[in-house]
Each structure stands twice: as C-alpha cells, then as structure tokens.
Image (cartoon, grey):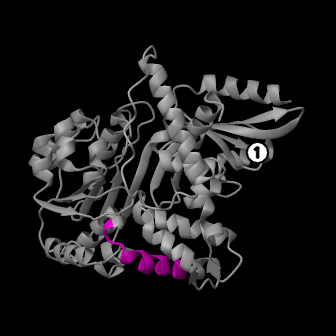
Amino acid sequence: MAERYLEQIRAIIRVCEDTDGILIVDKNGIIRDHRIAMNYYWKEEETVGHHIRELYPGLDEDSSTILRALRTGQAIYDQRQELVNSRGEQVELDATTIPIVVNGEVEGAVDCARFYVVGQRIVRGGRRGGLSTLGRIVTQSPKMEDLKRRIRSAAQLDSPVLIYGETGTGKELVAEALHSEGPRGGEPFVAQNCAAIPSNLLESLFFGTEKGSYTGALTRKGLFEEANGGTLFLDEINSMDIGLQAKLLKALEEKKARRLGGSRDTPFDVRIVAAVNEPPEELLRSGKLREDLYYRLGVVRLNLPPLRERPEDIPLLTNYFIEQYNRSMKRNIRGVTPEVAERFRRYRWPGNIRQLRNAVEGAFAIARGELLTAEDLEEKLGGGTEQQTRPAAPAPPPEEGISLSQAVERYEKGLIQQAMERCGSISATARSLGLSRQNLKYKLQKYDL
C-alpha cells in the first residue's frame, strides 16, 4: 500500500512541476509535506502537521478543493480561489487537487497551486477597519516609548518611512500606527509581504494586469491603485529583485503606474512605508538594496529594538498574550511559574515578539494548571532558553591529513551534538540551529546521532 501511495504522489508531482506550490495532505486534511516554491510563502513549521483550514480558516467542506477531493474521490482541475489566510492576507490562486486512491480508498490528496495574489492585505476605511494605533503597542521600555513619540510625529508627515527591525519585532504594527495616527487614517491601508515572491508575480501585484497580458491574467488593479489616497506598506522590501526595485523607484518618482499589458499610465497618490529585516547598511553593502531606492524610501527612518534589548517588556507582553488567549480559548490561566519567568528573562528571543506570542499560544494548548510551566513550553523553547554568556570557542585547526570538507563535517557534527544535548528535542534543536526539522533529521541520520 505504501509503495502505491508514493507512486501516485510522484506521478502527480511530475505533472505539477511548473506550478508555484504543492501541498500533500493525508485523508484527514492534515498537511504532510509541501514542495517547490511554497517555501517563499509558508515555512515548513507553519504547514506540516497542520490542517488545511488552519492555513485558510474561511474554507469549508465545499469551498476547499482539498476537502472536496478527499470527500468525493474526484479530481478538481484549475479552480480559481480567492482566500484569506490565517495571517489575514489575501490569496488568489488556481488550484488543481488530485486524490490519492489506494485499493478503492481515498488515502490523501496532492494540491497544486498557481498564485496570482499572495501575501496581500487590504484594509479599506483605514483606522475604522480595525488597524493598530499607538495605543496597541504594548510597552514600558524607554526605547519603545521614544519610538512611539517618533511614530506620532512621523504620522503627521507625508514623507516615505523606512522601518528596520528583526523578524517578529512588529514592523507591520508600526506601519499601521503611522497610517492610523495620520491624516490618511480614513483611507485604504494596503500591505504586501515581498519576501521571496518571484519577481514576475510581484511585478503584476505592484502594477496590476490587463486581461490576456499573460496566461490566466485578469484585469486587476495593482497595489498603487488599491492604496490610492492611503498608505502602501511594503514588508521585507530587501527580498525584492533588484530589477523590480528599479521599476518601483521609477513609479515612485513619477507617481504613476501602468498595468502589465496596459496602454496608459494611472496616476496615484500614496504614502509609502517600507520595512527591511536586515541592517540597511549591510543591504547596501551586499547589493540587496539599491542605494537610490534606499534614499528615496528612507526620508524618515525608524529602528525597532529587538525584544532582548527591552527585557522590561517581556513580563508585560507575556501577560498581554495570556489575557488574549484566555478570551479566545475560554481559559483562566493566571500567569507563568517563577521558573518560566526567569527563563523568559534570560532567553534571547531570536523570533522576538512573534516567538513569545507563539510560545504562549503553544503552551495554552497543553497547559493543565492555572500557571504555564516549563513543561508546557518545552516544545516551543526546548532546553536552550538561556542567553549566551560567552561566544562559542573558535574551531581548532584541522588535523594534518584531514581535508577541509572532513573538518567542516566534524565541526558540524559537534555543533549538532551540543545543541541536541542543550535543547533536548528535535524541534528546539532545529530552531536553535536555524534549520528545518527535515534538514536536521537528515543531518542526524548522516552523522548517526
């Protein structure tokens, strides 16, 4: 049975090679694997092991091609879907879903998607649409209070703003506050996550399309038209192709855009807020960000401190998230144990506020008492919760007669061994080393650990 199951998966994937993403689900709708360009949109830990409705909460047994194919055993080809994902982003795609049938029983399905809109969020009516304001930035840190004062001042201007902050520090929250607190607050707020989206797709999202401009293209407004009169927030703009950066700069200078396949320019009135998750100076030095675009966007620059630089906010944010999940999950968690509070204080939080929120949410799912314990958080943080007190020792020089590749493998094996002993679980170790679970499992097998 297992071999026939795998044979069908391989055959379907060969047919779907030129699509943007592939999901493989079991008969219950639980995602077991994702392939190809889905990596630019969903990370492995956000998909594998989750039900399809966790990614797209608005789907049901009829609107989901995956759930329908699992129920009926019938393949569905090229169905256009307009969805909102669990992050509140708009997604438009063509889905082909083919069930995997073994001995007359549906055992799973393969879903192949071609995207037309990805990672886009449009809030019409600005602050009336539920966007964040300065009051929603939870803090008692002097650094953050100073930043809030700068945001309040910058919101009154119409100049472009460039936000720098590590992943998970709340850049979109700041962008929303800049919009909500300013004169454009009642107009549309449009957010686009630029992270690693193929340049041909991103270009069509920016400038819009006319029907027939490419296969499957419909007449659609671009981001500039959607945001006209309001604010356009471009997150992780440093991941954008350099060639597209030049086209973006030209559109910003001329304040007009032409749809792909169109014959006329459309003027727009938009305030631009952009964000990067790497230091701007490094992006310029590495050539990931055009210098002229940087100066065009960075008229006002805001730097978000990472959570490890605002430790006084950790207990405040922890209690804030506990209150949130108490309401949404109908629980009555009173707080965390003293041990957890201390571990939170010492942890470096590489994923910043987003990681803290996810850790609290994950603990809620398994907590049995009135306080969140270290055991409740083991899966999310593992054993490696303390900050590094000293830098890792440099690797010793390779022994004579050992090749460079052998020396690198020996060093890598040692690092993985240490991380496994420190973290105690595959998930925590993978996070500690910046690897996917799948990649770590491969290395554990390779080194016989």
Q: Give the image location of residue 15, x and y in percent.
A: 62, 24
Q: Nearer the viewer, residue 12 or 134?
A: 134
Q: Main secondary structure of the magenta part?
A: helix
Q: Which residue is mark 1?
A: 70
Quarter of the image where one finds residue 22: top right
Q: Give the image location of residue 324, x and y in percent.
A: 52, 79
Q: Give the image location of residue 264, x and y in percent.
A: 19, 41
Of all residues, the one furthest to the right in this rendering is 103
Q: Nearer the viewer, residue 250 or 265?
A: 250
Query: Seen in the image, is 87 located left or right of residue 193?
Result: right
- Report if residue 80 is visible in the image: no
Query: Seen in the image, is 41 located left or right of residue 243?
Result: right
Q: Nearer the viewer, residue 189 or 260?
A: 189
| Magenta stretch bounds | 309-324
Q: Quadrant of the N terminus?
A: top right
The residue shown at (58%, 58%) is 382
Q: What amino acid type should be assigned to the residue bearing mark 1?
A: Leu
Compared with residue 142, is residue 164 higher up or lower down, i.e. above or below? above
